[in-house]
Amino acid sequence: MTVSHMFVNRRQVNCSVNYEVFERNQKLERPDENLKIGYNTQDSGFKELVKAIVLGTYTVFSYDPSDDDCKALYARMQKVPVTSIKGDLKPEIAKEMRARLIAAE
């Protein structure tokens, strides 16, 4: 789920730029000057709204990597192209790759 606009302190705020993305951009040698945030992270009303959203949101992620995802990880670990792996992975290898992908998620 993404948010484009929120209403904070009786005004519409543009929230289309994620703050972490904005911070990473600012650390670049040549930051993109068009990437701007439309909110003040120090504003008390904004902070309270974000806190309420975080505390009131319940999310469950049930990531189930596909066989292709497992093959891609295995190929990357073996430093070979994915196309060089023919057929399905051995069950024990597929199980390990699936576990690694879930843990990384």
Image (cartoon, rainbow, N blue to C red):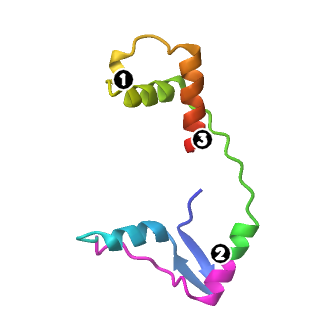
Of badges 1 and 3, the one in the foreground is 3
Which circle's residue, 2 or 3, is located before the other in the chain? Answer: 2
Q: Amino acid at mark 3?
A: Ala
Of badges 2 and 3, the one in the foreground is 3
Q: Which residues are magenta?
A: 32-49
Residue lying farthest top?
Answer: 87
The part of the image, by quadrant, that contains residue 102 is: top right
Mark 3 surroundings: few (<14), some (14-19) or many (≥20) residues within 10 A = few
Q: Which residue sits at x=76%, y=66%?
A: 56
| Label 2 SS | helix
Q: Which residue is under mark 1?
A: 82
Q: Which residue is under mark 3?
A: 103
Residue lying farthest left?
Answer: 30
Q: Amino acid at mark 2?
A: Val
Where is residue 50? Give x, y as percent: 65, 75
Q: Quadrant of the C terminus?
A: top right
| Label 3 SS | helix
State yes or no: discs 2 and 3 in contact (Cβ < 8 Å).
no
